[in-house]
Image: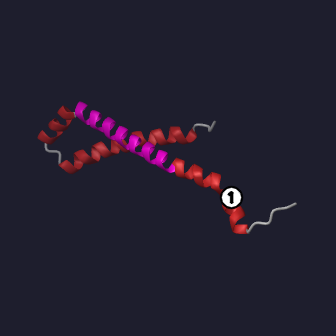
Amino acid sequence: MFEVRPLGEMRDVQMYPLRAASWIGSPLAGVALALSVSGLYGVLTYALSLRRKEIGIRIALGATVRAIVGLVLRQSMRLAGIGALIGASSPLP
């Protein structure tokens, strides 16, 4: 009454739902990554456009490009770190 199958075939049959989920999940993860990167780029661009005059004044007062890039990166990384902490501390559903 029992059906005899090779072990490899049984493993493939049992693993198929997981593989199918990973086939679907991988492109969705790629889309999510692309959306988050484009959103981050948009927010950073908007923040820099609001601070254009400030950056111009800093350059006029003698700030180097390296100092300005460092300032922008520090502030961006601080916001990203705060967001990561909030995201990591939130409970999973």
Residue lying at the far top of the rendered structure: 50
Residue type at tag 1: Val
The kind of secondary structure element at disc 1 is helix
> What residue is shown at x 15% (from left), y 37% (from top)?
56
Report the side of 2 relative to 58 (left or right). right
Indicate the position of residue 64 as horizontal and vertical percent values: 17, 48
First to last magenta residue range: 26-50
Residue lying at the far front of the rendered structure: 1
Q: Which residue is mark 1?
A: 13
Indicate the position of residue 7 as horizontal and vertical percent values: 73, 68
> What residue is shown at x 69% (from left), y 62% (from top)?
11
Crowding around mark 1 (Cα neighbors within 10 Å: few <14, some 14 to 19, many 20+) is few
User: Is 13 situated above or below 72?
Assistant: below
Q: Quadrant of residue 2?
A: bottom right
> What residue is shown at x 76% (from left), y 66% (from top)?
5
Q: Quadrant of residue 46?
A: top left
Indicate the position of residue 60 as horizontal and vertical percent values: 11, 39
Q: Main secondary structure of the magenta part?
A: helix
Report the side of 38 relative to 85 (left or right). left
Report the side of 65 relative to 13 (left or right). left
User: Is 18 situated above or below 5?
Assistant: above
